[in-house]
Image (tube, helix red, strand yellow):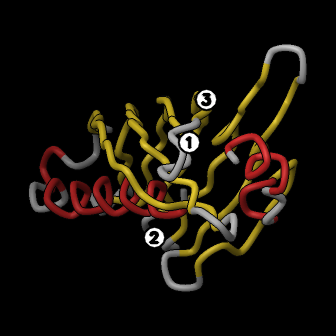
Amino acid sequence: MRLRVLVIAVTTGAFAVVVSTTPAAAVQPVPVQGTVSDNVPVVDCGAFQVWDEYTTSWSGHLLFDRAGNPVRIVEHLWGSDRLYNPVNGSSVSDTINASEIVDIANGQAIEAGQDFRVLVPGVGALFLDVGRFVIDFNDGLVFLKGRHQFFGGDVGALCAALS
């Protein structure tokens, strides 16, 4: 998950640097969008690793200061995950829906919304990571507010469901 946010932030940040080489047009916001898909291990359940096969898309705008320097990207993130146990093939699915500000000047990605929301019929919420968090490009996770089972390591119910 952290990798997913950093990939999006770095990709859009790199785009910001390229676009900033044309200062005449730099005052106007520039649309940014993209999609990234991957399949990565995200949780250690002891006997097995939970893998996350995800696709995340984003769309927003790159903003500049008065001097034409890129300072921020404001964007919407959406997508889907399939969290699965590669040993037995069991899986659960969820969706991603969040807003993000990539603060290029201060080197942080600020996200608010849902990153994991696994609901099981008849059971309810199995695994949630919702709220606000801040990832500093140098220091990693620096702020959490909300219900963050992923970041908090509260993965027992997810591991049990995929066992």
Q: Name the residue at 80% across, 54% down.
A: 149
Say whether disc 1 or disc 2 marks the residue closer to the N-terminus.
1
Whole-percent x and y of residue 28?
A: 28, 38
Tell me whether circle 1 and circle 3 mark residues in contact (CB < 8 Å): yes
Whole-percent x and y of residue 7?
A: 36, 59
Query: How far apart, in angstroms, are the residues tagged by discs 1 and 3?
Result: 8 Å
Label 3, on which residue? 94
SS for callout 1? strand
Q: Looking at the picture, does residue 81 appear above or below residue 10? A: above
Count of numbered marks: 3
SS for callout 2? loop
Q: Looking at the picture, does residue 6 appear above or below residue 114? A: below
For residue 108, side relative to residue 150 (left or right): left
| Amino acid type indicated by mark 1 | Leu
Query: How far apart, in angstroms, are the residues tagged by discs 1 and 2?
Result: 34 Å
- Judging depth in this view, the residue of 103 and 43 nearest the camera is 43
| Amino acid type indicated by mark 2 | Ala
Say whether disc 2 or disc 3 marks the residue closer to the N-terminus.
3
Label 2, on which residue? 105
- Judging depth in this view, the residue of 22 and 86 nearest the camera is 86
CA neighbours of label 3 inside 10 A, class few (<14), some (14 to 19), many (20+): some
Say whether disc 1 or disc 3 marks the residue closer to the N-terminus.
1
Tell me whether circle 1 and circle 2 mark residues in contact (CB < 8 Å): no
| Amino acid type indicated by mark 3 | Asp
Label 1, on which residue? 83
Query: How far apart, in angstroms, are the residues tagged by discs 2 and 3?
Result: 33 Å
Which mark is in front, 2 or 3? 3
Q: Name the residue at 38% across, 36% down.
A: 55
Which mark is in front, 1 or 2? 1
